[in-house]
Amino acid sequence: MNSTLAYLTTQLDRAIVAALGDDYAGTDPLLVLSSNPKFGDYQANMAMGLAKKLGQQPRAIAQSIVDNLDVAAVCEPPQIAGPGFINFTVKSSYLATQLQAMQADSRLGVAVADKPQRVIVDFSSPNIAKEMHVGHLRSTILGDCIARVLEFRGHDVLRLNHVGDWGTQFGMLILYLREAYPEALTTADALDLGDIVVLYQQAKKRFDEDAEFKEAARQEVVKLQAQDPESIKAWKLLCDQSRREFQVIYDRLNVNLTERGESFYNPYLAAVVEDLKATGLLVESDGAQCVFVPGFTNRDGDPLPLIVQKTDGGYNYATTDLAAIRYRIQTDKAERIIYITDAGQADHFAQVFQVAKLANWIPENVEVLHVPFGLVLGDGGKKIKTRDGESVKLKELLDEAVDRFRNDLESRLIEESRQEAPEFIDNSANIVGISAVKYSDLSQNRTSNYVFSFDKMLALQGNTAPYMMYAYVRPQGISRKGNIDYDNLGDNAPIILNEALELTLAKHLLQLSTVIAEVERDLLPNRLCQYLFELSQKYNQFYDKHSVLQAEEPLRTSRLMLCDLTAKTLKLGLDLLGIPVLERM
Ligand code: ARG
């Protein structure tokens, strides 16, 4: 919460008690940001509810609260409007003081959490030997941003990559590996297996076409599960190859993850089933061990079980997630566990969480939370594909964003008769291209599907990364042009907020900590994007209308401080989105 909001809340609480008595201590003042500047900056809406309770006129109640209210340090005299709203307009002198404090603080007024938590963010999590697809990309981008926000707030975040590195598909893969690369298992050197997805497809073809191969693959699974050294070696080779390919993407996105795949939990799976049995939750159904979770039904309306041990004795995705929850709580000491996957897995997580709760594995102080997201769609709202109808490779998708921005930039340079070194062009294209992909993902409400469009994400106008990055470049340009050192504007230089556009910009800047607290709570990065977009717009409006370098002192320094604060806020905000800034573009 920002300090003005906190201050007004405290003062209102006092005034309510003074006006209505101790019984009303702690009444929610229903304080919100005003939707329209006409009604000031904040609005308290509790008078109507209190009036109903007390059987009095809401305006009279509002008046008696205002009579007892002392907010002169921060606000102009509060106004009562409509049926009984109390409107507050923050004094510009107070805004100036707040901005000065923000300017002097390396965290720009965003406090560290009162109670830092141990948080696990489970994200990205592609599957070994399979394609890392746009859904995994979305999870990676969202997860990194959420982790960054939590880290910035001082939480102790463990970023876990729950890769799908176990399961029956390894039977056919290992068998095929032996057939196709007999040397793979005998040489000590790391082997390049080429495109692992192609290998998967070939293995799958053999598996589907050849009954003998299929049977042998089943045997291979048993061997792998029994930790046969040769099978483990082959399995490791396959994992390493995939891992190298995933890492290329993580490096380009600049995302850090700790890999802890499904296989990690193998030693803990049997105990999950045993302990569930002991709680009496386990039911045998068609030879499988299941838990029936109240409220879950299939399409026909029949109860839908969560299977934790298959008929053949094998464990599955759900068993692994149950083991993972226990491990994360008991060993990692997690207090908040966040899973970032597409919305298609909502039922899986709801069931898994419910079973863990029924089994009493989730203590009261621990929050487990599925953070779902919608689909990434291609043109026409259909599944995203290449022109030849193939599934898009993430590497190519990132390359295309970079290439397109490079082309745009090169034509702009020609238009502007600007000369830039090839390194400058390369670096800008790489950074802006990748950032555009990230930003287009983060700026959507994650719960909706969105259409992946290079044209939209690379546009210089609108809610895009390039727009925001240009907004950052402007104040840097001012400092170069005017030879200004933003770090040396003077600690006590006054901030003067006489113009409407200065005031609007100032108020928006001061919302930063509120917005970050919201993102921390709701895990919706698009709120931060929207904030930064509006900040860029407000800054651009201010800059277009008012001179900065040409202004007379002390206005000149005051405006330079607004430029600097805007730049710092954009830089911090973009950093929390996983987007770097460029000093010029
Ligand atoms: N590997 C899964 C997939 O590709 C995502 C795993 C998400 N995390 C988890 N703990 N289940 O769909």
Image (cartoon, rainbow, N blue to C red):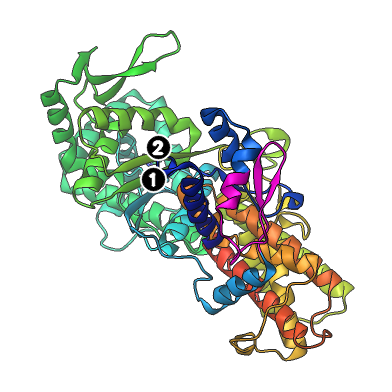
- In this rendering, the answer to whether 404 lies above or below 391 is below
For label 2, the residue is 203
The one of 14 and 566 positioned closer to us in this rendering:
14
Question: Which image quarter holds the C terminus?
Answer: bottom right
Residue at image x 19%, y 15%?
284
Gap between marks 2 and 1 measured at Cα = 34 Å
Q: Is residue 558 visible?
A: yes
* 328 horizontally vs 465: left or right: left
| Amino acid identity at mark 1 | Ile
Ligand 1 in which quarter: top left
- Sequence-first disc among 2 and 1: 2
* 13 horizontally vs 231: left or right: right
How crowded pointer 2 is (Cα within 10 Å; few <14, some 14-19, many 20+) is rated as many
The one of 11 and 481 positioned closer to us in this rendering:
11
For label 1, the residue is 338
Q: Secondary structure at mark 1?
A: strand
Between circles 2 and 1, the one closer to the viewer is: 1
The spot of residue 462 in percent (x, y) is 76, 55
The spot of residue 382 in percent (x, y) is 66, 33
The spot of residue 193 in percent (x, y) is 40, 53
- Check if mark 2's residue and mark 1's residue have beta carbons within 8 Å: no
Q: Is residue 77 magenta?
A: yes
* 85 horizontally vs 280: left or right: right
The span shown in magenta is 63-90
Q: Secondary structure at mark 2?
A: helix
- In this rendering, the answer to whether 23 lies above or below 486 is above
| Amino acid identity at mark 2 | Ala
